[in-house]
Amino acid sequence: MRIRTAAVTLLAAAVGACGGDNAPTPPAAHIIPGGGIADGPIRGSLNVYVIDEDTREVLSSAAVRVGAADEQEPCAGLTDSTGLAAFASKDCKLLTKPVTMTISAAGHAPSTWIGCDGSNVTVALRAISAPPLGRATVTGTIAGWDTLPPPAANHQTLALIGASNNPDLSDRANDIDQGTRQVVINIAGVDYPIDIASNICARNALVDDCDWLLTTHTGPQAIWAILLDQDTKGTDDESDDTTTVTGWAMKTGLTFGSNTSTGGVSLDRIADAYMQSFAATFASGPSGLDYMLAYPVLDLGAEGRISIIAPTLDKTTKMTRVPKLTGPLAGAHYDMIASAIDDPTKPVPATLTWLRNVNPSAPVAVSSWQSPPSALAMTAGVFSFTPVTGATVHGAELQTMDGQRRWSITIFDGTTSFTLPGLSPDPLPLGTVRFSVSALRIPDVDLKNVAFDELADVLTDISSDEITYSR
């Protein structure tokens, strides 16, 4: 009797721990800035916040479907005025293990998460028609431009002006078109106006102009200039030109508001004594990915990152010149981003690696590459691919042929084939659709508790490939 009584007591205690008055309190609902997963694993409750990817504003009346495409009894709800759709096990029997969710909202590309294992999630949807970016216009010059030595015959001095990027590689504000401005060249005593890129300074036999104009993003940033000597070899064929970095100029501590215009910004030249070499070496790429390139990244912290893309480092040009980390740059550090592709005219297949906190005093070596996903297919509504060994998470997109996202899929649990639920209205266009798959390596990340905004500082590899299919 005593043994049986003890067993019953233990059983009753176990039941009490799983439900009733002693059931654990579900985690409170909360937004994860930028999107992510928290409070994993799922324990009988699921709070789904939906936000706009660009504006970060919550989306009300977004549809949340919990359950795979073939689930006979999916759970469904709409987000309220705070952007929240909440589910509990008493109404949704699927909350005993990682779930598949599909989230959709008017005017946005839907998103499907496979293997999501957290009690709180925030899903960011991209608007199909992207909202206008906040932009600022800045004009200025480079201090001491007029005192630079004249270029030699068949050479020209150029300066490329840019602003530090926001940390997110996919941030649209990092890719703002610059347009052109007009300068005057003099040929045989006659002035002729011509158009050049607005963020370029140029000095050659025909023109000497450094009144640059930059269209930039809003918020804290630095504006920089790379001074270059371009050897034209005396020909009109640009393919034989060579470019050498001769100096840098920079202005830190700047911030701009939306739709503002700021003039008179003079970039301070960095003395040669405060410059250093930066070199790169490359391991062999994955099969077929033989075209390699890299560029240093100067991380300024709150003021963003400067991607030093001129000149690009490759198997031929293995070295450039960069500022030393002294003075106003004492708190900065260098990274290097490198990529390997099959064909410079095609974006995929490709692999990218991000080397962090590198030391420019020695050549920075890309010692290995992550292979791209392979065997992409879409057959009778089933999407499939061969995953990348060692990748942390895989993602997929369905896109229009001009690259517009129409459906996003994030795979947390190693799934390699999936179908998508029907949605009304159908977000996919008729005709040809692009199916793209990416593999991400993110060391030491916990996919049950992850804020996507923080991944920009720890992501090490992205590789991708794509196919097209017809609907």
Image: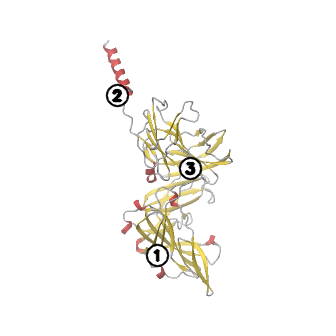
Q: From the image, state whether disc 2 or disc 3 is nearer to you.
A: 2
The x and y percentages for residue 70 are: 59, 33
> Looking at the rendering, in which quadrant would you find the C terminus?
top right
* Residue holding disc 3: 371
Helix, strand or loop for disc 3: loop
Q: Is residue 9 left or right of residue 463?
A: left
Q: Taking the image as drawn, is residue 171 in sight?
A: yes
Task: Specify the farthest residue to the bottom.
Answer: 189
* Residue holding disc 2: 22
Residue type at mark 1: give it: Ile
Mark 1 and mark 2: Cα distance apart in space: 69 Å
Number of residues whose C-alpha sits closer than 10 Å to that of mark 3, classed few (under 14), some (14–19) or many (20 or more): many
Number of residues whose C-alpha sits closer than 10 Å to that of mark 2, classed few (under 14), some (14–19) or many (20 or more): few
Mark 3 and mark 1: Cα distance apart in space: 43 Å
Classify 72 as above or below 274: above
* Residue holding disc 1: 142
Classify 368 as above or below 220: above
Residue type at mark 2: give it: Asn
Residue type at mark 3: give it: Ser
The x and y percentages for residue 213 are: 51, 71
